[in-house]
Image (tube, rainbow, N blue to C red):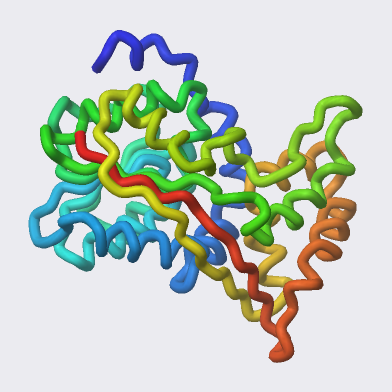
Amino acid sequence: MSETAAAAAGSARPQADLWSERAQDWAEVMEGWNGWGIPLYRYVLDHVTVSTGTAVLDVGCGAGRFSRIAADRGATVAGLDATEPLIEIARTRVLDGDFRVGEMEALPWADDSFDVVTGFNSFFIAADMTNALREARRVARPGGTVALTVFGRPERCQSTEVFSALKRFAPPGTGQASSAPSAPGLHEEGVLEARATEAGLTPRHATYLPFAEEYPDLATMLRGYLAAPPFVRAARAAGEDAVREALSEALRPLETPSGRYRLRDEVRVLIASA
């Protein structure tokens, strides 16, 4: 483990506290059979070499939906997350997977362990994103792949308006929880590439990927979104009823004529070589 990673302050403890509260809801809705990340997972898997025997590590693996899809393509999978309840679910989804609780800035695997390392909207949560990417490079084999996503351009994301429902619950003067929790600027062309280069990676493909989330009804969408840390944090501060009402108001414009709910969003995707 690198000296820098070992000294990292880490983000695992506060993240685990927030993600643990509604882990089952997150797993069943947002990482369900048709969860929000499915188009992202398939895009990355179609642009990297994953086949029988490929060693894949998912950083911020959550409840293991991506790991299950990668395993179905023949990969040997591992995953790291801060949240024990999510890791427990991941272990039931991929029985022979190597799932561990820990810090993304101090990955508990040896150097050169994986052919592919992924992080879907996870690396920017680290206390130091560059350190987290250095750790991803360390555990990737020379010439291996590190692939990651962050939230896309705010004006192209309907989730921007959804997360704006949290503005009323932010302490005065803080401006917190005013948008999706991506670090400022990471969605801009060249910014993510520069961060990866700083971490010792070589960017080879970057793009914006539009996708849609769809839910059968408002109750299901509420269940999924209320499990996300910004909404958990707001509910602790202002009460669940108030947050549920504000979120419901923000989601109602997304209702389709069939009564389902569809949200169109975008991520910035980067695929780099270690």
Quadrant for the N terminus in the image: top left
Is 151 situated left or right of 206 in this image? right
Q: Is residue 98 visible?
A: no
Is residue 59 or residue 43 the one in the foreground? 43
Q: Is residue 80 left or right of residue 190?
A: left
Q: Residue at x 12, y 38 (%)?
A: 143
Provide residue 199's location: percent of width, then percent of height: 32, 24
Q: Is residue 12 left or right of residue 256?
A: left
Q: Quadrant of residue 147?
A: top left
- The answer to whether any part of residue 187 appears in the image is yes
Q: Is residue 241 left or right of residue 140?
A: right
Depth order, front residue of 25/136: 136
Which residue corresponds to the image point at 20% horizontal and 34% vertical from the top-left?
274
Which residue sits at x=30%, y=62%? 68
Q: Residue at x 61, y 34 (%)?
A: 184
In the foreground, 55 or 96:
55
Q: Where is residue 178 shown, x and y percent of the image?
A: 76, 41
Q: What count of labels does the image hold?
A: 0
Residue 194 sits in quarter: top left
Name, please, the residue furthest toward the bottom: 258
Percent position (x, y) of residue 34? 47, 72
Quadrant for residue 38, please give it: bottom left
Q: Position of residue 244 (x, y in %)?
A: 82, 58
Front-most of residues 99 and 2:
2
- Most extreme residue toward the front is 189
